[in-house]
Image: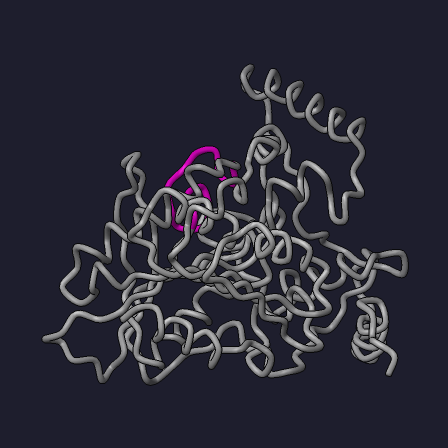
Amino acid sequence: MKKRTFTDRYVKILRAVALGLILSTTGTGAVWAADMSHGADNFYKSDKVDVQKVTFKNQYKMNIAGNLYLPKNMDQKQKHAAIIVGHPMGAVKEQSADLYAAKMAERGFVTLSVDLAFWGGSDGQPRNAVAPDIYAETFSAAADYLGTSPFADKDRIGVIGICGSGSFAISAAKIDPRLKAVTTVSMYDMGAANRNGLNHSLTLAQRKQIIAEAAEQRYVEFQGGAAKYTSGTVHEINEASSPIEREFYDFYRTPRGEFTPAGSSPLLTTHPTLSSNTKFMNFYPFNDIETISPRPLLFITGDQAHSKEFSEDAYKRAAEPKELYYVADAGHVDLYDRVELIPFDKIESFFKANLK
């Protein structure tokens, strides 16, 4: 039987999406209708859990914003297993992380979705700055908060890291043994992605050019000039757009997943600052990943995901206990919000087995 490729799958998706094409009346191009297939439900609200907005300090005295999810039938006299959920890189907790937190709270866990420092409701200036060590610190700060709360058991705290937060969660777990079990979903190694590009498509010369441009931009900002932004999700797509650009656009630039946090602008969402983005060049989250053992690792990726190389690399380097779990016919962004594809049963069984 012929194996379907990433391109094959997205040709089918794009044909379906094309049926919903709406021509813009502003003359700026085309607006594509959101693909809501496979139960896409980023903004899911549950009537089985209570949600509280919380803030707490990280080790650098920065306020971290979170949404705390408590099962309505929770025994208030007991302490419970808890899960920290980190959002995709460039996103905020309202994009994917809240969905995972709500669904896992329905299954009996105390859950906490968080905004990484410099993003969403968390502190950090300039906004959208890249600081991988401080991103990782967000997970340890969340453990501080949960571990001192009356409802979470400090010895039963796990993590779900989505996209870039997968690599930040791994980085945190290497030096924080309180994180007892880690699941990554559609993980991006943000260091390797920036150093090498997908499938090692970035040359050393191109990398050095990016570094040089960022260094020059520091002079501009030091002298009071405006910040520049880079990468992230495109704001328009056309016939020449790549499948990956279309995939991210369908989530971040349509009602399916678009969310602009207070104080930001739709033009800035998903985009890190140019001068700080090179910090990822020095980020090596999978170095020493084997030292997390004997704490368990579960790497979840779509078998059609453009990012699966990162989960495969992490799995290869990690020590037991570990598992690499492929979701059939799923791409990278599919696992952000398509509840018919996200393996919640698998995630539940992983944490129930390892947070006890």
Kindly indicate the quadrant of the structure image that contains residue 21: bottom right
In this rendering, the count of numbered labels is: 0
Instruction: Examine the rendered structure and indicate whether residue 100 appears above or below residue 39.
Output: above
Q: Is residue 79 visible?
A: yes
Q: Please give the name of the residue rendered at 21% of the width and 80% of the height, measured from the top-left corner.
A: 74
Which quarter of the rendered picture does the C terminus lie within?
bottom left
Q: Please give the name of the residue rendered at 31% of the width and 68% of the height, measured from the top-left corner.
A: 355
Between 200 and 239, the one lying in front of the other is 200
Left or right: 308 as drawn, with respect to 71: right
> Is 3 contained in the magenta span?
no
Give the main secondary structure, helix, strand or loop, of the magenta stretch: loop
Q: Position of residue 207 (x, y in %)?
A: 74, 30
Q: Is residue 21 visible?
A: no
Q: Position of residue 61 (x, y in %)?
A: 27, 36
Q: Please give the name of the residue rendered at 67% of the width and 39% of the height, measured from the top-left corner.
A: 194
Left or right: 184 as drawn, with respect to 173: right
Between 343 and 39, the one lying in front of the other is 343
Between 318 and 100, the one lying in front of the other is 318
Left or right: 162 as drawn, with respect to 4: left
Stretch in magenta? 116-129
Between 133 and 63, the one lying in front of the other is 133
Kindly indicate the quadrant of the structure image that contains residue 34: bottom right
Which quarter of the rendered picture does the N terminus lie within?
bottom right
Q: Position of residue 26 (x, y in %)?
A: 79, 59
Q: Position of residue 107 (x, y in %)?
A: 35, 81
> Is 122 contained in the magenta span?
yes
